[in-house]
Image (cartoon, rainbow, N blue to C red):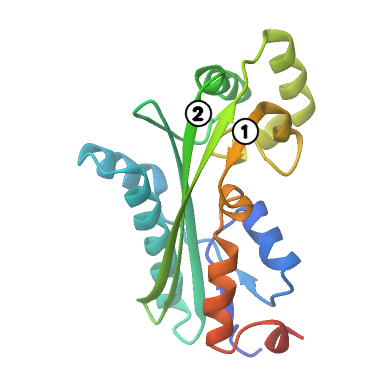
Amino acid sequence: MPAPALILASASPSRRQLLTSAGLAFEVEPSGVDEDEVKRSLLGERAQPQDVAETLAELKAKRVSARYPAAMVIGADSTLACNGRQFDKPSTLAAARQQLLALAGQTHELSSSVVVARAGVRLWHCNERARLTMRPLTNSFLDAYLARAGEQVTASVGAYQLEGLGAHLFSRVDGDYFTILGLPLLPLLSFLASHGIGLEKSA
C-alpha cells in the first residue's frame, strides 16, 4: 500500500466530514495526545484559549507526522471561553446540561486552530475565532434538546453541533462557519492546493 499523502490527526467526526465534503482523499490517524493533561498544564500557566488550541493542534499534527514522515498531517483543536472561563467537552449529558446553562444568554468565543506538519515539523498554521450568542434556555427546552441530540453533544466543546440541532440554541453567530465546526477550512484548502493537494490530486 502506498503511503498516504494526507492524514487527519483527529477522531473528530465533524472535521472528517468537512474534509470529505471538500472532496479530499485522506486517512484518519488519531494522535493519542493526552489532551486533558496538556490543557491542565497550559491553564496552569494561564495560557489564552487560542494558545491552547494552537498548542494541541500542533502536538497532534507533529506526533502523527513523525510516524508518517512523507505525509502532510493536519492537526486541529478548538477551545471555548465565556466570561473568563474555559470549557471542555462535557463528559456526560448531565455535564452538558450544566455547561449549556452557564452559556445560556451569554456570548462566548470559540477559537479554532489548524496546523499542518510533515516529518515532525510544523509547516503552516492558521488561527480563527468566532463569537456566538446563545439565547436564554428554559428547562423544558434543554430537556427536549438533550433528548433529541443525545450523546452526540459530548463530542463537542460547546455541547452543540451548529450544523444540526445546535442551531436552535443561538440568537446570533459572528464568524466563519467552518471555524465554528472546528476547522478553518478555507485557508487550509488554499495551503494544501499550493502543495499540490486538492481536487485534482484527490480525483
Q: Quadrant of the N terminus?
A: bottom right
Rendered residue at 34%/56% (across/down): 55
Residue receiving disc 1 = 172
Residue type, mark 2 in image: Thr
Relative depth, front residue between 48 and 136: 136
Rendered residue at 69%/37% (across/down): 152
- The circle on residue 195 is none
Residue 65 percent coordinates (x, y):
44, 75
Relative depth, front residue between 170 and 102: 170
Q: Is 142 positioned to the left or the right of 131 in the image?
A: right
SS class of the residue under badge 2? strand
Q: Is 114 positioned to the left or the right of 17 in the image?
A: left
Residue type, mark 1 in image: Arg
Name above or below for residue 126 compared with residue 165. Answer: below
Rendered residue at 68%/9% (across/down): 139
Residue 119 percent coordinates (x, y):
39, 82
Rendered residue at 58%/87% (across/down): 3
Name above or below for residue 184 compared with residue 195. Answer: above
Relative depth, front residue between 49 and 73: 49
Residue 199 percent coordinates (x, y):
72, 82
Residue receiving disc 2 = 107
SS class of the residue under badge 1? strand
Q: Residue furthest left?
A: 45
Q: Earlier in the sequence, mark 2 or mark 1?
A: 2
CA gap between label 2 and label 1 equals 9 Å
Q: Is 119 positioned to the left or the right of 151 in the image?
A: left
Q: Residue furthest top?
A: 139
| Quarter of image, res 174 | top right
Proximity of marks 2 and 1: CB atoms separated by less than 8 Å: yes
